[in-house]
Amino acid sequence: MSTLRRVQALAERFAEDTVTNRRQLHQQPELSFEERESAAFIARQLHSYAVDHRSGVAGNGVIAEVSGADSGPTVVLRADIDALPISEATGLPYASQKPGVMHACGHDAHTACLLTAVRILSQLSDTLPGTVRAIFQPAEEKLPGGARAMIQAGALANPRPRVAIGQHINPTLPTGSIGVRAGPFMASVDDIYLTVHGVGGHAAMPQQLIDPVLIASHVVVALQQIISRSSAPETPSVLSIGRMVANGATNVIPPSVEMAGTFRTVDETWRAAAHKLIRRCAEGTAAALGGSCELRIVSGYPSLYNDEALTSRIAEYAAEYVGPNNVQQLPLTMGGEDFAYYAREIPGCFYNLGVCPPGRLNKPDHLHSPRLDLDEAALMTGAGLLAWSAIRELQLTE
């Protein structure tokens, strides 16, 4: 039996356990930096598979390794383990048991797939000309994220891996399909916090005041001109203000207005320049209208760049595993991912796993939705492809 067929057979053999693991994690979600029970569950499963691992990496991270009989390169497979502050509305029998917390981004599926991939690899260690390092990473959903802390804790050291591979569910792609994109794939993520100051007072006497609500409204509109007039048309960028709080009343103009938003792009040079323009625009607009603006930009994840050569190989491995007709090219997205940190240290590829059953393709679910559900039949593909990609990468001769 070929190695490919052995991987597929083991993925099928362990499919029920993969689903069970995913449902267990789904019922007990934990927010970023709080994933203690999730990490303990991962460690228990790895122990039951007799796989070497260490817990408590960068807080709640877990790292496992499967090595072959012969020394060789190291390949990283990575999954994230945290959940979101969302109240689940799926009505599933295995829905979240924690009010206000849900695996609405598929991290439960990512973790379950990687656990099974490690289990497959441990069964096939005789075929491994090297080592596969599995990183179960905390805190992808909340800045500053867990990837950088994992790297600082040595996740990419001793020895330095050849490549890093990550997988994310995509509820808009059909079950059993794989989506890839070489080069720029996901945006940088920066949080913007603004406080517009004026002079509050009676809403019936605006001539005696400096209205921060009006000023804040002008600031929101003015900031959009940074995207429409300062950004190169060929450089995708997004600047969105998602929160505006003016604690006044029908007859009260407040003294200040709080705002928050996000800035995203795929060009790091433009990103740095835009930060300066955002500050100048917000402060200048407020001053021109008689007020002032305090602004704080929290730099988050960098843009995610998929190594062209590695991504081409992953597409090839996926074609071998699911058939070339089930591999498709993805568009660039303004979503962000801290897998970008791994991909800036070593060649990386972050690809998508389709989890939408055919009957729902005309009305797919979306990530971060309280109603997100996924076709669990896709987990068998996700687990097997991770294992197969690692094996194929280790088989490369430099």
Image (spheres, helix red, strand yellow):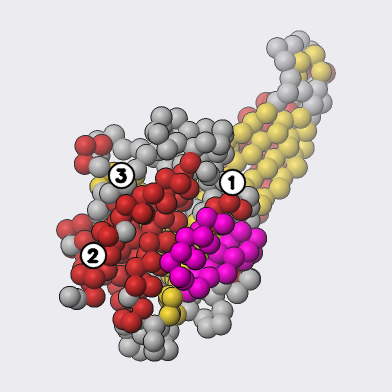
The magenta region covers 40-65
Q: Earlier in the sequence, mark 1 or mark 2?
A: 2
Residue 254 visible somewhere in the drawing: yes
Q: State which mark lies toward you, 3 or 2.
A: 2
The residue lying toward the viewer, choosing from 65 and 347, is 65
Residue underneath mark 2: 9
Q: Secondary structure beneath disc 2? A: helix
The percent coordinates of residue 367 (x first, y second) are 42, 42
- Residue drawn at x 34%, y 72% as measured from the top left: 123
Residue underneath mark 1: 31
- Residue drawn at x 52%, y 81% as measured from the top left: 160
Q: Is residue 81 found left or right of 115 in the rendered image?
A: right
Is 197 drawn above or below residue 275 in the view shown?
above
- Residue drawn at x 68%, y 43% as measured from the top left: 193
Q: CA distance from mark 1 to mark 2?
A: 34 Å
The residue lying toward the viewer, choosing from 210 and 381, is 381
- Residue drawn at x 70%, y 40% as measured from the top left: 194
Q: State which mark lies toward you, 1 or 2.
A: 2
Q: Amino acid at mark 3?
A: Asp
Q: Amino acid at mark 2?
A: Ala
Residue underneath mark 3: 375
The percent coordinates of residue 369 (x first, y second) are 44, 36
Q: Is residue 22 found left or right of 200 in the rendered image?
A: left
Q: Amino acid at mark 1?
A: Leu
Q: CA distance from mark 3 to mark 1?
A: 23 Å
Where is the N terminus found, in terms of image quarters? bottom left
